[in-house]
């Protein structure tokens, strides 16, 4: 097959940070069969995702006005940027991730369909519906309306969990035949985890410490504050939070308030955070909202015993008392109890970790995710 017959796929995501949606875009863009597809990526900023894409020899386009927060002027400017990019790059397929990018890139794709003679196929991946967040009722109504409008722009909607597909159908967000569940898949050969000793040395932890860790953006949806509350009475345990984001100062203040500064480590300069997972005796995901988080797949692959809130598609990875422990969101006392139980029963944690790794390796492969996604192209 000659280069001219390759399908051009343009991936668009709101932020170029190295988080769930960014990892998803990177894996697909770098995993496409080169003989059949030509990938490019567009996102806001030039953060770690952008750097990795460029290092991988894939064209990267910065959408200068893309921001997570709503700003009518910047949003209109980013709409113009993406529309211009579509007309200049002439992709065969536009594959968009994240809610903000979904709406703006979807509208730009509509303009392209209306005013260009070129045919284009549009795909939207939902990494957890925004209307699942805990918000005032009037906001939920508006977000559902926005989600319905967004889905009108796309030929196919990928939900990263069966849970998200079902709630989309239940809320009439899009027709059932337009929605398909494709689990996030993990590249097992990508992860060169630091050994337990090496990871602990890099994090400044003692080899005898019992360590509970988590990885994720410092946002309210990640629920870090509830992990901190759970830690207040667990005096014999060290805690590590690796990430970045606007809630950092609030988290530090909360740690100070409970007098746990010597037991808590906040790390903000670990771009390949997953490589440190073996430093943890227990991995906790205290999120209030998720789709199907990569970090749980990574924690399972690293054989960390997992405690997670039961939100989004997490139950499709974690089976309570079999591949991990599930707690309700915003329930620090439940978190405290489960952390203490794994502190006292290390063998149970090891069995949970072994089962989780087997499940993730078997059911959440990148190869399966890629094949199912290509079938939509």
Image (cartoon, rainbow, N blue to C red):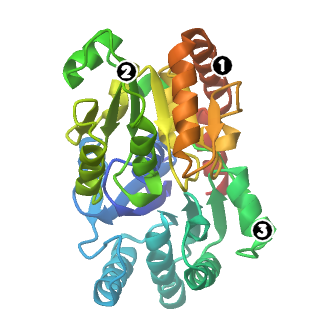
Residue in the picture at 58% in, 53% down = 291
Residue in the picture at 65% in, 71% down = 155
Label whose residue precedes the other's in the sequence (3 or 1) = 3
- The image shows residue 50, relative to residue 340, as above or below, that is below
Compared across the picture, whether 348 is left or right of 168 comes to left
State if disc 2 and disc 3 touch (CB < 8 Å): no
Residue 154 screen position, x and y as percent: 61, 73
Compared across the picture, whether 192 is left or right of 306 comes to left
- The one nearer the camera, 81 or 118, is 81
- The one nearer the camera, 194 or 237, is 237
Pointer 2 residue = 236
Pointer 1 residue = 355
Residue 195 screen position, x and y as percent: 33, 12
Distance in Å between CA atoms under marks 3 and 2 = 46 Å
Pointer 3 residue = 169
Label whose residue precedes the other's in the sequence (2 or 1) = 2
Decide if residue 68 is in sight here.
yes
Quarter of the image where one finds residue 135: bottom right
State if disc 1 and disc 3 touch (CB < 8 Å): no
């Amino acid at each position: 097959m000659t280069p001219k017959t390759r399908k051009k796929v343009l991936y668009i995501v709101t932020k170029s940070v190295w988080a769930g949606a960014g990892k998803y875009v990177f894996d697909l863009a770098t995993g496409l069969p080169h003989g059949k597809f030509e990938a490019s990526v567009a996102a806001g900023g030039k953060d770690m995702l952008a750097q990795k894409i460029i290092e991988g020899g894939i064209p990267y386009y910065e959408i200068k006005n893309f921001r997570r927060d709503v700003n009518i002027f910047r949003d209109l400017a980013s709409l113009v940027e993406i529309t211009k990019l579509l007309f200049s790059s002439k992709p065969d397929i536009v594959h968009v991730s994240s809610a903000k990018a979904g709406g703006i890139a979807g509208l730009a794709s509509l303009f392209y369909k209306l005013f260009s003679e070129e045919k284009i196929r549009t795909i939207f991946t939902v990494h957890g519906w925004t209307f699942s967040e805990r918000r005032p009722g009037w906001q939920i109504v508006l977000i559902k309306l926005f989600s319905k409008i967004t889905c009108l722009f796309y030929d196919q909607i990928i939900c990263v969990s069966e849970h998200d597909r079902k709630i989309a159908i239940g809320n009439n967000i899009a027709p059932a035949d337009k929605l398909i569940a494709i689990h996030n898949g993990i590249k097992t050969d990508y992860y060169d985890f630091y050994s337990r000793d090496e990871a602990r040395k890099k994090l400044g932890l003692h080899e005898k410490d019992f360590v509970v860790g988590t990885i994720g953006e410092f946002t309210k949806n990640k629920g870090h504050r509830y992990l901190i509350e759970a830690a207040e009475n667990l005096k014999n345990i060290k805690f590590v939070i690796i990430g970045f984001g606007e809630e950092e100062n609030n988290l530090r203040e909360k740690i100070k308030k409970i007098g746990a500064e010597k037991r808590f480590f906040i790390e903000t300069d670990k771009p390949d955070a997953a490589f440190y997972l073996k430093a943890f005796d227990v991995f906790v995901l205290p999120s209030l909202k998720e789709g199907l988080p990569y970090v749980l797949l990574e924690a399972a692959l690293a054989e960390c015993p997992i405690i997670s809130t039961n939100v989004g598609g997490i139950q499709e990875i974690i089976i309570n008392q079999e591949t991990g422990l599930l707690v309700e969101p915003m329930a620090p006392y439940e978190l405290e109890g489960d952390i203490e139980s794994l502190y006292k029963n290390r063998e149970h944690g090891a069995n949970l970790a072994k089962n989780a790794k087997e499940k993730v390796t078997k059911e959440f492969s990148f190869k399966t995710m890629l094949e199912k996604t290509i079938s939509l192209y």
